[in-house]
């Protein structure tokens, strides 16, 4: 993964909808390079016809025809797609609310780890039917229930078909990290020191840091920063709190430091971000 810090990807979602589905096809695809980034939504990428690679941390996975990838929210990743004839890919991105609407419960590891797999051609044909039909009906009025049913079927298949990549890290240690993330999120411990996190896992600081970055593709402190910024986004969009008050509630040392970090990662100041949300309803 590139040494440059991750950037926040803004995903336009129509007002009142908790997901977005996009189909990209080209008979003369020139290639695509997507820098290290994260977003607030979960993501499923389906590649019926593509070549390239997908990277998290130090791990790179090959993209070929009929590749299926599931990415949890806030997980930093990057992607390279090669030029080719007849390129085709689908992108489904959705909020936690959409999962709840579909009555789908993710396993703990699915909330923090990517899943990558390859499907057979017969399975690929069925996926193409589902997503092709869903894409077509998105353009029609009063088709929300049908689209929801089609995409729910696709997501259930994805969660059952593909798995988290094989890891040299013991399952017990991955479970400890899952428990740590659960503790951080429940208690909003976004200022947790790396040494204290290592102690909670009963590991040395060096082993914890190495293992955490191997699993999440970023350091603990970068991970906590994305959590704090996510909370800031929610407060900017749903409250009238002052910027200084949001900085305090998200555990930044002062509002100037908060604004600097926010602009570096999110691409605009907290004030301008709030203005955009008020105008478009999107973040």
Image: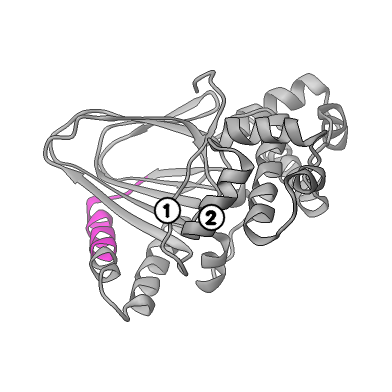
Residue at x 50% of width, y 23% of height: 1
- For image coordinates 62% across by 45% down, the residue present is 271
Image quadrant assignment for residue 152: bottom left
- The image position of residue 151, as x and y in percent, is 38, 66
| Crowding near the residue tagged with mark 1, few <14, some 14–19, many ≥20 C-alpha atoms within 10 Å | few
Q: Give the spatial CA distance, label 2 vs label 1.
A: 11 Å
Q: How is the image coloured?
A: one colour
Which marked residue is nearer to the observer: mark 2 or mark 1?
2
Prevalent SS, magenta region: helix
In magenta segment, residue 116 = no
Reading the image, the residue beneath label 2 is 277
Q: From this viewpoint, which residue is outermost toward the bottom?
A: 142
Residue underneath mark 1:
12
Confirm whether residue 73 shows in the render. no
Where residue 102 appears, as percent x and y from the top left, is 50, 71
Query: Which residue is depicted at the point 69% across and 39% down?
Result: 174
């Amino acid at each position: 993964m590139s040494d440059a810090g991750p950037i926040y990807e803004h995903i336009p979602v129509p007002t009142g909808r908790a997901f977005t589905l996009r189909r990209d096809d080209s008979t003369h695809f020139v290639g695509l390079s997507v820098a290290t980034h994260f977003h607030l939504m979960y993501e499923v990428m389906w590649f019926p016809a593509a070549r390239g690679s997908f990277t998290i941390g130090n791990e790179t996975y090959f993209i070929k025809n009929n590749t299926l990838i599931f990415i949890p929210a806030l997980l930093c990743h990057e992607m390279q797609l090669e030029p080719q004839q007849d390129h085709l890919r689908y992108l489904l991105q959705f909020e936690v609310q959409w999962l709840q609407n579909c009555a789908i419960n993710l396993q703990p590891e699915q909330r923090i780890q990517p899943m990558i797999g390859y499907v057979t051609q017969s399975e690929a044909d069925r996926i193409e039917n589902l997503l092709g039909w869903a894409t077509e009906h998105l353009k029609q009025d009063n088709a929300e229930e049908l689209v929801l049913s089609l995409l729910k079927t696709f997501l259930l298949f994805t969660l059952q078909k593909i798995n988290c990549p094989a890891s040299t890290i013991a399952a017990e240690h991955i479970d400890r990290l899952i428990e740590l993330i659960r503790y951080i999120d429940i208690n909003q411990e976004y200022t947790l020191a790396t040494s204290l996190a290592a102690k909670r896992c009963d590991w040395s600081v060096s082993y914890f840091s190495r293992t955490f970055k191997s699993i999440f593709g970023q350091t603990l402190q970068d991970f906590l920063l994305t959590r704090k910024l996510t909370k800031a986004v929610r407060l900017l969009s749903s409250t009238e709190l002052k910027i200084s008050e949001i900085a305090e509630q998200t555990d930044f040392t002062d509002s100037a430091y908060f604004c600097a970090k926010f602009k570096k990662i999110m691409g605009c100041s907290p004030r301008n971000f709030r203005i955009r949300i008020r105008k478009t309803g999107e973040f």
